Image (tube, coloured by chain):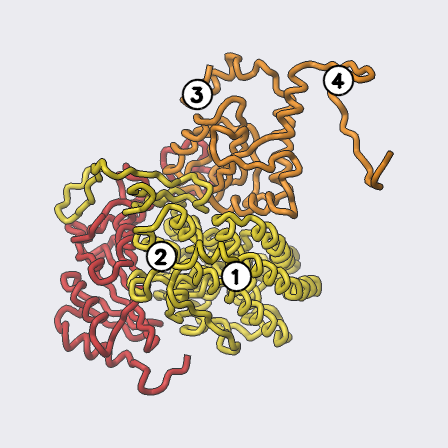
Amino acid sequence: MEINDPHIIIKPLDTDKRFNTLNLGPTHPATHGIFQNILKMDGEIILDAEQTIGYIHRAFEKIAERRPYYQIKPLTDRLNYCSSPINNLGWDMTVEKLLGIKTSKKVDYMRIILMELARITDHLICNSVVGVDSGALTGFTYVFQEREAVYEIYEEMCGARLTTNMGRFGGFERDFSPNAIKKLRDFLKRLPKVLKEFETLLSRNRIFMERTIGVGAISAERAMNYGFTGPNLRATGVDYDVRIMNPYSSYEDFDFIIPVGTQGDTYDRFCVREEEIWQSLKLIENALENLPEGKPHVDIPGVFLPPKEDVYSKMEALIYHFKIVMGELDFPKAEIYHAVEGGNGELGFYLVSDGSRTPYRLHFRRPCFIYYQAFPEMIRGSVLSDAILTMSSMNVIAGELDA
Amino acid sequence: MTVSNATYIKVDPPEGYSAPGMFATRFEKVVGLARKNSIWPLPFATSCCGIEFMATMGAHYDLGRFGSERLSFSPRQADLLMVMGTIAKKMGPIVHQIYEQMAEPRWVIAVGACASSGGIFDTYSVLQGIDRIVPVDVYVPGCPPRPEQIINGFMKIQDLVGNESLRRRYSPEYKELLEKYGIKSKE
Amino acid sequence: MALSRKNRMENELIILKLKEKFNKNILDIDNNSDILTVTVNSDVILEVIAYLKIDEELKFEFLTDLCGIHYPNSDLPFGVIYHLHNFKKNKRIRIKTFISKENPVIQSITSIFSGADWMERETYDFYGIVFKEHPNLKRILNVEYLDFFPMRKEYPLEDPTREDKDNRYFGR
């Protein structure tokens, strides 16, 4: 398509023949996810990088304009698919904010337990993959066993392993079964030992430290200018965490530390994520100790799906079920922005509702999309292997990048 | 002399003549047996199914037991193209190019609903199944499929590999199949 | 988060300062939704965002989000919506501007916030809103040869040329 508009400036193609161009991706073993980087290199030093993304653009925002509110949840699963419960429960909270529903402490504490489990799995993958990219494959195999343990807990709650589609507006369809609580307690006993082993492998390993300290550094001012959030921003020294700044789901009842780095390089990002796993473990233990009794959902028959036994036997329950799933509820006309702390940062949902069954506009504020812009600035002047480590320590998930 | 208490399960040998110290069978059976137990896959993981593949390669559901311990990210050295995840229209030419770069004999497995038929994404930007651009041998449905399902699909590929005739890749039907996809056959 | 009295910033202060500086260009103020929402004239958007960032009392130093929206039945159908955040006082604000269909051009804010770069490219890709003085305005998520702007309300979700899915069975 020819663009003749005088306002649009497109950078001309580089025809300087002194430097060589290296194409990194989209299919490359080290780019975890599909995005392309074209690097302009002078020997081994990288001078500039140009990125192409969109190789997995699935048009979530357009699909969301077509689907009733209940049916959007499977889409949110597939944003950051390493930690799907956070996306699901974030969407639940957004719609509850729209409808003005307040959830009970029991629901909030259950949500905290599941979201922190998801955060642990996301950080475990990211850290072990940083190890893999620097050549240490052992940590990866140890850590994936723990992911299997978390998958079993998810299966007790909702039946699926990875793309969980968990929860309902107003709570959950079932409480933690005794089996789930037992698995959770076993997991809480086992993970500290595995984490300590993982730390002895990598955190104070001299080769790993020499490879990651000073690599891919970014200053706090530049990070804030770009819109970084999450562990990447905390590694530069800014202690911004949505759980503390705009608390949701009763996070204000708990006391936890926000780990903060100093230089914003790869080693700081690794350590911040490591420490966040310990903090999440503490949060889950506290929430499990103080989990109140009661129903796993609030009493809102107009919005919460009726129990399945009633749906199959009673007429009103069947009608309610159909109406709720097809979206025939009274949604107010409003604009809502709600943010949760995802594995990578502030995951925001901007929802414009015009009173009809489907959203008028739903926009996902995806943290990966926003901080990946800074990648060329972070790798300018470093060598290729450092660029690979920077990319994997930033935890770029392709589903969240492209949506 | 047994050194352990393990029970050994014997696999049926292919049909042939056996005598002390020798076993005679058809050449293609031997080649199939060797190939099927040492497939080198190319994991073309794009989205969520890629994470389930990582779980399949992990220690719990070990895919290395089936002989595919060595993953090859270079298409020139791979036997099996495992397409896992959604393929958008932007990515289509790249899948096609990777398939063309693979050497014969090559197989393709489409893991997941998105690779088989577009999945839940019936939109303007998603390719509705990779069989629009490359010939596929096995489809594994699921969103994402459990690791056991991926292993089931992999075992079906092993059946296909073990029973393939040596002349299949030179036959006119195969050439016609590749013509349909616009891929030049290697002969 | 409990802030002391001197750290809290009230919405009224923000409204007062904005009205003082940009009198006629503030078209609408909505103080009743979850975040203070201000609709401004699209000609002054760069000055408004710069004022919000640099002013000593306001200091909205973080650009949370930038997205587009399309209201086909209104006079100014395309809208661009900015969400800003002040960390120290924990305050969010939403700025909306609307532009016309014949001339969908608006000033880019990449000179103030580098993070707006890709967000504006995404808005251009989806709605066709052109950002003046953007360093590299081309499509980012869709294929380059796509000749329409998909998120506009007149275009369908599905690819109309697909032959394997029959619309009758999918309820469309």
Q: Residue at x 60, y 37 (%)?
A: B69
Compared to A165, does B184 lie above or below?
above
- Which secondary structure lies at badge 1? loop
Q: Nearer the viewer, residue C61 or A71?
A: C61
Looking at the picture, how far across and down is residue B35, in whole percent? 62, 25
Disc 1 is attached to a residue of which chain? A
Q: Alpha-carbon neighbours of circle 3 within 10 Å: few (<14), some, or many (≥20)?
A: some
The residue under label 2 is A371
The residue under label 1 is A204
The reply to whether label 1 and label 3 mark residues of one chain is: no
Q: Nearer the viewer, residue A361 or B61?
A: B61
Could you give the CA–CA distance between mark 1 and mark 3, rounded to whole angstroms? 56 Å
Looking at the picture, how far across and down is residue C99, in whole percent? 19, 56
Could you give the CA–CA distance between mark 4 and mark 2, rounded to whole angstroms? 60 Å
Could you give the CA–CA distance between mark 1 and mark 4, rounded to whole angstroms? 58 Å
Q: Colour of chain C?
A: red
The answer, for residue A273, to whether it is visible in the render is yes
The reply to whether label 3 and label 2 mark residues of one chain is: no
Q: Nearer the viewer, mark 2 or mark 1?
A: 1
Compared to C159, does B33 lie above or below?
above
Residue B180, numbered circle: 3
Q: Colour of chain A?
A: yellow
The residue under label 4 is B15
Q: Colour of chain B?
A: orange
Q: Residue at x 72, y 15 (%)?
A: B25
Q: Please state which amino acid type lies under the numbered disc 1.
A: Arg
